[in-house]
Amino acid sequence: MSEYIFFDPTLRDRFLTLVADHRIQADTRPDLIEGFLVILPEALPDEIDEALEEEYERLMDEQQQLVEAGDEQDRTVMGVDITLPDGRACVVRLPPIFARRLCDHFSGDEIRMLVTEIAASVLDPATGPLCRER
């Protein structure tokens, strides 16, 4: 029995299509940790086995690209250095979607002033009507 692991269902399905084209019976099941296993019989003709191995390698290259693309998105974060009203310095982390939009429309100093004002308002929330002077 040969086992192939996939982490993306689309890539698994593409592999299963190739297996079915060769009229091979495949079993699939979720992996115990993560992903999906495709289980094939052990005694396949060499040329079919080689074709499956080549396709699996191509699909694993695509899997790696998907993981790397996901990693890049996950690591994109913006930190804004601010000084709180009591004099403490801190970094406010902004999610990528907001960081990109802010950078498209504001300078670094403007972003810092905006985040500083938000932090100050969180630490000393306004009560009463918003139209009053500070």
Image (tube, grey):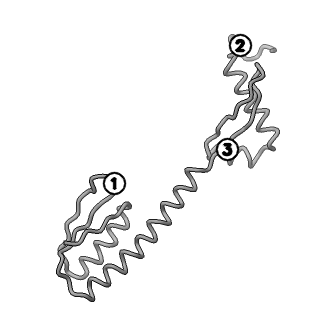
The answer to whether mark 1 and mark 3 are in CB contact below 8 A is: no
Residue underneath mark 2: 129
Among numbered discs 1 and 3, the one appearing first in the sequence: 1
Residue drawn 20% across the image and 82% down it: 44
Q: Where is residue 43 in the image (x, y as percent from the top left)?
A: 17, 81
Q: Residues within 10 Å of mark 2 (few under 14, many from 20)?
A: few
Residue underneath mark 1: 34
Residue drawn 23% across the image and 59% down it: 29
Q: Nearer the viewer, residue 118 or 52?
A: 52
**Quarter of the image where one finds residue 132:** top right
Image quadrant holding the N terminus, namely bottom left
Determine whether 105 is above or below 115 in the image. Answer: below
Residue underneath mark 3: 78
Find the distance from the CA under tag 2 to the CA under tag 1.
52 Å
Describe the element under mark 3 as helix, strand or loop.
strand
The image's mark for residue 107 is none
Q: Position of residue 134 (x, y in %)?
A: 80, 15
